[in-house]
Image (cartoon, coloured by chain):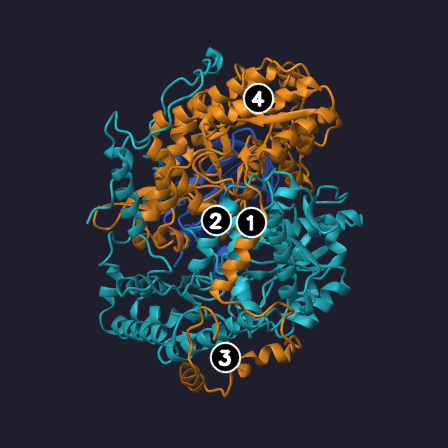
Chain colours: A blue, B orange, C cyan
Amino acid sequence: MSKIIDGLLYTKDHEWLKVEGTEATVGITDYAQTSLGEIVYVELPVVDDEFSAKEEIANVESVKAASAIYSPVSGTVSEVNEELSDNPELLNKDSYSNFIFKLKDIKMEEDLLDAEAYREYLKTLD
Amino acid sequence: MYSYIPHTFGDEKKMLEAIGVNSIDELFVDLKEGGCLLKDFLNIDEGLSEEEVIRKVKKLAKLNVQGVSFLGAGVYDHIIPSAVTSLSSLPGFVTSYTPYQAEISQGILEAFFEFQTMICSLTSLPVSNATLYDGASAAAEAASLILSSKRSCNEIIVSSTISPFSLECIKTWIKGTGNILVILPEKEGVSDFDVLEGLITNKTAGLMVQTPNKYGFFEDLTGISSIVHSFKGLFAISSDPLSLTLQKSQGQWGSDIAIGDTQSLGVPMAFGGPSAGYMAVSDALMRKIPGRIVGKTFDNQGNTAYVLTLQAREQHIKRERATSNICSNEALISIMNVIYTSQLGFKGMKEAALQSRAKAQYLFEGLKKLSFVSTKNNDFFLEFPIEFDSLERLEKFLFLLKEKGIFGGVRLYSLTKNKEDEKTLLVAVTEKRTKEELDEYLEIVGRLENE
Amino acid sequence: MNSEKLLINNSVKGRSAYKFPPLDVKPAKPVKDCFTRLDEAILPEVSELDLVRHFSKLSSMAFGVDFGFYPLGSCTMKYNPKVNERLASLDGFNNIHPLQDEDTVQGCLKIYYEMIKDLCEISGMDWGTLQPCAGAHGEYTGLKIIRSYFLDKKEEKRNIILIPESAHGTNPASAHMNGFDIRIVKSDERGLVDLDDLKKNLKADVAGIMLTNPNTLGLFEVDILKISKMVHEAGGLLYYDGANMNAIMGKARPRDMGFDVVHFNLHKTFSTPHGGGGPGSGPVLFVEKLKKFVPIPDVVFKDGKYKLDWNIEKSLGKVSSFYGNFLVIVRAYAYILSMGSDGLKSASEHAVLNANYMRVILKKKYKVAYDRICMHEFVLSLQNLKDSTGVSALDISKSLIDRGYHPPTMYFPMIVHEALMFEPTETESLQVMDECCDVILDLYEKAEKTPEELKKSPCKTVIGRVDEVLAARNPVLKG
């Protein structure tokens, strides 16, 4: 069973986000990292770049797959997890304690799911 | 009895029985149902025997005229060592598929790895792919790479002195993509870098130049990479790989992307194809470079092993998000290239380059003396333009040479379609030309002085 | 057994493998300092014998069609006739420069012209170009023709290409390269294009649909006439991916099915060798109304001579330096001469016969996805085997290597789980297929009895399974 953490918000593209005021911390869920397999590369966004919601913002690659990460909300990139450049496998180890990027000045979206809704969504997939 | 189809009637009978049908026609029932089944034979002649095919095709080859070639513009009549031809014809190389099954393809993968190593060595850049289709399409791929790497930019500056074929391929690619091609004009036969900064906007993604350029002239790229990098743009340089033995490599000029055509590394002219394009990039572009790439790793016993890697960039994984759709490339040509560069080594390649340059200079000095021809002072690799006083003179020049089996040069107009290039001829000389051939050339055209 | 050392690691300073004739003119003036290369590039220094042994060894660590059975689905690994190699090496072709005067290259131009005509006859199209250097290159070119068509008609809003979910990855990538977005059309329970889903997707923004027929499952789209009618009525065009043409030469023509643009893979259907991944050739053929967009130069026959026509007002431009991979075209041309209309038809008939034969033999143990009469290829799904024994399509493939065969295509198309796609081609005999099928059936039993063994394979090759994760995480891309 995929690990899901309560208190976080989720998207149908298997991203999680932690919202604090006008800032969000974003990563991929356990389901995403399992589907990808062993992750070999993470393409991080550039700090200070602005993105709209649903815009492609990052990429996570394994040997046989490449997954685009879409910005769950609009905002400006404030920080990226540089550790993932040298150790992309951290996302396989624990995809929740290893964020990918942070956004500031965000505008919330309506289609974000809470933990329960995401759990239900996962059930419909397999 | 059909060529290459081994089935006997007995075989067919057994197979049809096993499948549970009475005839091969029954296997095409879906075509019938779909309303697509052809009733008649195709309007193509019946199949010929091997001997008849040889006769027919040899006759066609004889319709072509071979000559002493002073033609260039991207394809050159260089010496090709025998070992290049014979080794690249080995069936293990020729009849293999793409090496997806690494365990049975180590030979091919290693050959590609050696090709990549060679390209990195020549270009002084750390990452190379295992070929693109040719130099012109490589230029289009480089333009695409530059534009897709810069998120908010949609303009690319390209010098007008790059090969007209490369420019045409870029123009073709860029149509309908929403990107804008900005041309850097030329002055005195080279890129006019004085006006470069005036062309840069906040939408410029990068710059592409070529040296030796379309006229065969070396371009001085001192300081250009600093200009491009000052606005975080990407800098691409296209070069004939043989010229890299003499001139600064793309990496040494500070570029991010190096491209070109590998025809001058052991590939026959063959009416323009097949050849191969090469692309090498900086580390920062490693995950974006198009084309197949071979990497070194280990197997489950700890042995060194080679494998196609970074496949997540490619079409079979990224699909519509891939920056390029390239699948089959020019693999066997890369094997010819790496055999050539391995056989000659840097010293041998430099000798081919220097001999070409020496002979081109010899011919140039001779042609300069002609009263009806004007030349430029730019330094060139092995190709140079000469301008005639009239179109009639240019045509008579070529005609006299052709009568003696010499192809004297490429009409620049045929490349650029610019009226002002009508009286210019592009002459290329390689290490293959002998002093006798050069002297004969000069003697024949010298006769025009008396007219 | 260790793999062959890199040639550069076998170098000895000062060794040389080639002697040029002595320079017979004055040495070249040195290049200006500001242009001069700053170092000597590191390249091998070996003797000619070292060179020959090295590359001979490398060529033996490969698996070609010349060595064994190669049932790679979707690749058409048929025999590469030796006469084609002989003809492609003629001096009368190799020593010709592409920019020679037209009257000196009539042989080359005639081959081009006749080749386009032959391919038009095979496809039913009106004209074509041989400029693309590979199938994907042909797709790029063909889609650019479609793009040009709608831009010319001022229908820029048509920026969607429909693609079936079973399509090859080059299809959406080629569409994207031309500035199109894509929409996926689902397959129905037959494995064919779902007509209802197609109807839903045929909106006013559709420029066209890319299809291959038979599709990537080896099944013929029986509704193709309905499909082409629907797409044309919606104002779109149809693109035919010719990768699977080996199933229907002389039996059906893309034009008759309603297609407007076609590309062929000469290195698949027309027997030219794969060369480890190229050179190939991807000719594009099209209907009359699209002729005005042909890449420059076109080849024409006028006043008894073949000429290159550069004056094509609405041409899409160029996709490669010159006219295409000429020596590849020579091989395919010779192949068509050898086969003729009767031979090409027989080739497709026997390709389909062979595929169906292997299908019925292998289905004794394996599950065939969409088990009915197939065309030139078929797909097995090993999901059941994986669930019950843990042995996957990958494991069976690697075990086949130990038994002397090249594996089939793995994990494609993506709509079948644990897929293995087989395409024997018509050049394989009953005996070869019987022996191979025996081995594949035996592997099924081994999977049930000793699955661990299969998971360790291959064991008889130079190297075992490679660490692809390491290769992608810490790339080492040069020596």
Residue C39 point in image, percent of width and height: 37, 19
Say which chain tag 1 marks.
Answer: B
On residue C90, the disc is: 2
Vertical arrangement, residue B300 with respect to residue B73, above or below? below
Q: Give the class, few, some or many, for how many residues have Cα within 10 Å of label 1's Cα (few <14, many ≥20).
A: some
Residue ID for mark 3? C372
- Which mark's residue is nearer the viewer, 2 or 1? 1
Query: SS for tag 4?
Result: helix
Mark 1 → mark 4, Cα distance in angstroms: 28 Å
Mark 4 → mark 3, Cα distance in angstroms: 73 Å
- What's under tag 1, amino acid-wise? Lys
- Which mark's residue is nearer the viewer, 3 or 1? 1
Say which chain tag 4 marks.
Answer: B
Between residue A26 and residue A63, name the one nearer to us: A63
Residue ID for mark 1? B62
- What's under tag 3, amino acid-wise? Arg
Residue B450 point in image, percent of width and height: 68, 18
Query: SS for tag 1?
Result: helix
Q: Earlier in the sequence, mark 1 or mark 4?
A: 1
- Residue at 60% in and 25% down: B444
- Which mark's residue is nearer the viewer, 4 or 2? 4
Mark 3 → mark 2, Cα distance in angstroms: 46 Å
Residue B319 point in image, percent of width and height: 53, 51
The total number of labels drawn is: 4
The image quadrant that residue A88 belongs to is top left
Q: Are circles 4 and 2 on residues that touch, CB within 8 Å?
A: no
- Which mark's residue is nearer the viewer, 3 or 2? 2
